[in-house]
Image (spheres, coloured by chain):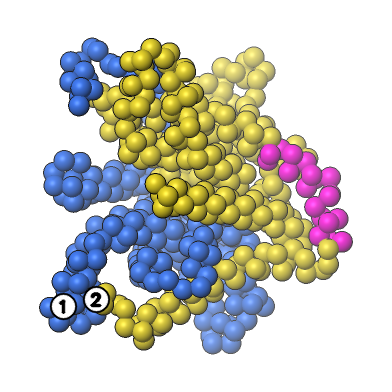
Amino acid sequence: MSHFVLRQSGSARVLPGFGLSMGISVLFISLVLLLPITGLFGQLAGLSFAEYWTIITEGRVVASYMVTIGAAAVAALINAVFGLLLAWVLVRYTFPGKRLLDALMDLPFALPTAVAGITLATLYSSNGWMGSWLEALDLPVAQTWVGIALAMAFTSIPFVVRTVQPVLEDMPVEVDEAAMSLGATDGVAFRRVIMPHLWPALVTGTGLAFVRSLGEFGAIIFIAGNMPYETEITALMIFIKLQEYDYVGASAIASVVLFVSLALLLAINIWQGRFVRRLHGGKA
Amino acid sequence: MQRIGDAPLVRRLLIAMAVGLSGLFLLLPLVAIFAQAFSQGVSVFWSNVSDFYTLHAIGLTLGIALLTIPVCLVFGVALAWLVTRFSFPGRRLLQTLIDIPFAVSPVVAGLIYLLLYGRNGWIGGWLDSYDIQLMFSWPGILMVTIFVTCPFVARELIPLMQAQGSREEEAAVVLGASGWTTFRRVTLPNIRWALLYGIILTNARAVGEFGAVSVVSGAIRGQTNTLPLHLEQLYQDYNAVGAFACAALLALIALLTLAAKAGLEWRASRREAFA
């Protein structure tokens, strides 16, 4: 325990490298992460608030917010259910091919988004493997917002699985035994015993999936069809403005996206910090 | 004692649903990539891969990844050392800040670099007067790639180094080892596998980055076209086989990444079992 005493005495740090690692970290974070964000504010400084407001509330841009948020919400909900199912099956059961299924969960993170994009677009096009029979059922996916939600769900599923999985693994057997020995049915026990443990992690994972979906670009643009007002996502709006050399317009819309995603990230971090503290009895 | 959801019928139903849905939504796309790439035979696949512009894109992509990895490695190790071995005000803030690249849309990441280092930006304009252009050339691609990949090594190391604690390193220092020796002989052997996985993740993302790179690259064939951008151009030109040939190469890297992860996890679980 002596190292606690040493550390508390303040100036006497036992381990070397504080200055060096602090220097590298602060320099890197300032130059690579924070400095470029100042460029965005520099670009916006020349705008009056009225001009800024006009750009970010233009009809086509607002339509893109709606498409992006709506599809991301649907994708996040699908992933909450699908991710919970996958995490449950991977933790609680043994079956042939389980390792393979577990490895497959990371595929959307490992696969480049553009590859996912052209593959989903081809699979769900009207003559693709999936698209042809979905078309026969009158359920077109490509070039609709369903396709956008599908691409978002594909790229963000690992967030839910990998956040819920460790919490489920750490749940003691006694919890199950207590519930079952008191005569609870599966459904009741799951709702009343498992879910209260699980839902903080489930909310965190779903939140991360939602944030990722809001910013996703490569996986979506190929399947979306990119019709103005209909299937145009906000990230694409920024890209289009850039191609028209409208740097001011691109920056204004980007600042909205940046603000929303950083605010959500902060909220998720605070939420996660709070529930981790609660689980560890106030000593996180 | 029976556990929740252990009834044979429930178990089989849930496993079947999980496997079926994963097969449809995750495995089928993977199979489709290779099916499309080889749909006109191996020789057509090969002629697409050995095309000059494809080879150039492969070279550029690998070069960028090769330069990105050491930068992210130094930063990741330094940050992990800092936040797990010392306590100081602002420690939590630093840990939140490194998550920024995960939350920022790739297109926005590309844009903020373009605004700062482009010809109209305040650094870019100054560099331009010395005839140095970073955007629409490989240094710009490298810069945004570093931005999007920098959290991976740190994020792999921090939980591990936090769990291991600093007792072993403190013992080494008290016994008279220098800082560098302590790191090399005590810390490094403990973290090498997490470090390796961090590098593999950094590589996978660096090779596959699309949104940020497409903003700053200009996508000039044979000059600033990375493999994902080249794939997009081929796809837009209705050369599906060519696009999927590039996609198959990238998917292969993704599969190797998954295999490496499974291997490292298997190794860790075996060590735990023997410990």
Q: From what the image shows, is residue A21 above or below residue B11?
A: above
Closer to the camera in the image, B106 or A60: B106
Q: Quadrant of residue B26?
A: bottom right
Under mark 1, the amino acid is Ser
Residue A192 occupies which quadrant of the picture? bottom left
Query: Residue A216's spot in the image, x, y percent?
Result: 48, 53
Magenta span contains residue B61 = yes
Q: How far, Cα to Cα, is label 2 from label 1?
A: 8 Å
Q: Residue A47: percent from the left, percent from the top? A: 39, 34
Q: Secondary structure at mark 1?
A: helix
The rendered magenta stretch, by its main secondary structure, is classed as helix
Q: Residue at x 78, y 41 (%)?
A: B56
Q: Looking at this view, is A248 or A109 the one in front? A: A109
User: Range of the magenta residues?
Assistant: B43-62
Q: Is residue A2 visible?
A: yes
Q: Chain of mark 1?
A: A
- Mark 2 lies on a secondary structure that is loop
A132 in relation to A274, above or below: below
Residue B221 within the segment the image draws in magenta: no
Colour of chain B, in one word, is yellow
Q: Is residue B24 left or right of residue A173?
A: right
CB-based contact (under 8 Å), mark 2 and mark 1? yes
Residue that numbered label 1 is attached to: A181
Quadrant of image for the N terminus of chain A: top left
Name the mark on residue B1: 2
Question: How busy is the neighbourhood of tag 2: few (under 14 within 10 Å), some, or many (20 plus)?
Answer: few
